Image (cartoon, coloured by chain):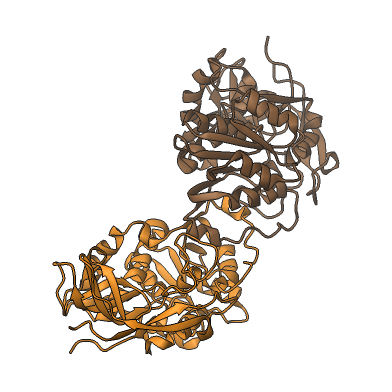
Chain colours: A brown, B orange
Amino acid sequence: MAAAGFRRSVVLKRRPGGEPSRGDFDIREDPVPHPEAGDVVTRTIWLSIDPYMRGRLREEQTYATAVQIGDVMTGETVGEVVESGDPAFQPGDLVVGARGWQTHSVTPGKQLVKIRKGAAPLSAYLGILGMPGATAYAGVTEICKPKPGETFVVSAASGAVGSVAGQLAKRAGARVIGIAGGPDKCFWVQDSLGFDDCVDHRSIDLRGELHAACPNGIDAYFENVGGAVQAAVFEQLNPFARVAMCGMVSQYNEKTPPPGPNLGFVVGKRVLIQGFIVSDRPERLTEWRTMAEPLVAEGNLVYREDVIEGLENAPDALAGILTGRNFGKLLVKVSPEPS
Amino acid sequence: MAAAGFRRSVVLKRRPGGEPSRGDFDIREDPVPHPEAGDVVTRTIWLSIDPYMRGRLREEQTYATAVQIGDVMTGETVGEVVESGDPAFQPGDLVVGARGWQTHSVTPGKQLVKIRKGAAPLSAYLGILGMPGATAYAGVTEICKPKPGETFVVSAASGAVGSVAGQLAKRAGARVIGIAGGPDKCFWVQDSLGFDDCVDHRSIDLRGELHAACPNGIDAYFENVGGAVQAAVFEQLNPFARVAMCGMVSQYNEKTPPPGPNLGFVVGKRVLIQGFIVSDRPERLTEWRTMAEPLVAEGNLVYREDVIEGLENAPDALAGILTGRNFGKLLVKVSPEPS
């Protein structure tokens, strides 16, 4: 049978104190299971690496259950069905929705979504057409609500979420300023994504450069990083600014988070600061995919991928995304795409 | 003529470094002016003292223009018309809307609202039926949106804004917990306002007492004080909590505001934090007055006043409200009510 053989899984060995590393995980081998009724076995092709995964390694639970020691590490994948106990799926179907850092996953069929072959590259369903894209969509349209002529700032601007957020704000008519790490990313953000400007957060005068890029102040901010970038942006918010709090990746490796901004400005400037998690309304993902597929196909939404080969390199990939070593949507290629 | 004679005004002499004091102001005497066409001269009966006034003493402007050195200090009053250049007003009319720490003010008639005689005590138009009441109404109904069974917390609970905010949340069916300074205020908040509990912010275990009072966490918070109270409340917010940022009086005398909370929780708990200023939508005040007048008349909304006699004591009154020395809506009685 197609599902015969062994599979490899990356399991949590110990909770990392700071930056996660290869030694915090084990590789486990076991036979590829056969599916129970209703379940589907998939061969993983693409594994998504996202900053939120760091939170799953903590003892304390946040909004989602922590990964337990000995458990397979969680993560979205695109895969090919190899054996199905759900009549809705056949071997050879391509699906998104299985979770796990492993070469083969067993997933209830009702959690899987079939990918329409040829509509877009498979990997795009983990990035611009997946959770990161839908996250950008939710934060921009439900919280930031940029209006024509307003100034919209997004941090981690070359990343999977930030790059989409800025493009959506641009489409809404805003002046869009990215914040990214290093000249290559900043160049790409302006040249390929078409943002109006991009500020390097490693600049010794982040505040001054941000001010030069936003002479009329900041009306909306899509927050991905926290820390010094957050402080610089908050100082330059305009009255009635909206801040979509998507993440604060700069502190995900910290044991004790540093103090934050004094919130007096929130009163005087009537600022709205709102946290959100895309999966709270799963229908957002379907809505976004339907809307974005043609835009991606026509080249009206641009994305960039950073691909790491081999499941065993997933821990290094996670460490890298937390310090901005990736450039674009970070993916692990676990096995070949079907020819 | 009725407006003949001299008037006294409290003018800003120097900007206070910390707590404002009598020495930061001068008393100026000049003849009561006659009104130009469209203007109205009023004799001040009641002057409202509110925490926001501290912000007007700062060099840097916030959302409103700073009071300049030598200028009459600003503040809402209830007064009696003594001479009118606006045909809509006659001597003897009672009005709210004139601004200034002075015994007589000159105000464009279009900024004044006539008080319907006998509907409520005159002073109530500066408190529960005035800007503080409308502020509570805006923050509760537009941001906190308490639902039946939810836990609603308000700081400065015995104050002009907090006491109304909690009563409105109670009417919406929420479990309402006040935070106030000292046993007398806490007793009154529970006994007279009918809050479910009240925590003394001077307690050595504020966090623990707040947790005991809010065993199911906090769903909505009406913020008036900032500082340690804010930190304790923020730690205990539930997912999807709403925070109405009305003020942070604990730091109004500080030159450099202290660091604030790390905002990581805003993401994980999808918290909404929103600043607001009631005067951004002036129609709120009319809407609130119309709604609240009968509730106050029937005793269904309770309030308490703390009255200081004499205009010359207004600076001390302001210093007192910034450190919580008042108990209830703080007012200066400038001259007698009409008999």
Q: Quadrant of residue A154?
A: top right
Q: Nearer the viewer, residue A13 or B16?
A: B16
- Please identify the quadrant where the N terminus of chain B is shown: bottom left
Query: Is residue A16 left or right of B309 when viewed as pictured?
Result: right
Which residue is rendered at x = 81% and y = 40% of the image? A25
Q: Quadrant of residue A99?
A: top right
Q: Nearer the viewer, residue A228 or B114?
A: B114
Q: Is residue B290 above or below residue B268?
A: below
Which residue is rendered at x = 72% and y = 39% of the image? A73
Q: Nearer the viewer, residue B234 or A107?
A: B234
Q: Is residue B112 above or below residue A334?
A: below
Q: Quadrant of residue B49?
A: bottom left
Q: Tell me if residue B259 can be seen.
A: yes
Which residue is rendered at x = 61% and y = 39% of the image? A213
Which residue is rendered at x = 62% and y = 52% of the image? A62
Give coordinates of residue A18: x percent, y percent. Answer: 80, 49
Q: Which residue occupies the extreme right position in the image? A: A23
Give coordinates of residue A93: x percent, y percent. Answer: 59, 17
- Please identify the quadrant where the C terminus of chain B is shown: bottom left
Give coordinates of residue A79: x percent, y percent. Answer: 65, 22
Q: Nearer the viewer, residue A233 or B155?
A: A233
Give coordinates of residue A209: x percent, y percent. Answer: 67, 42
Query: Is residue A323 left or right of B223 when viewed as pictured?
Result: right
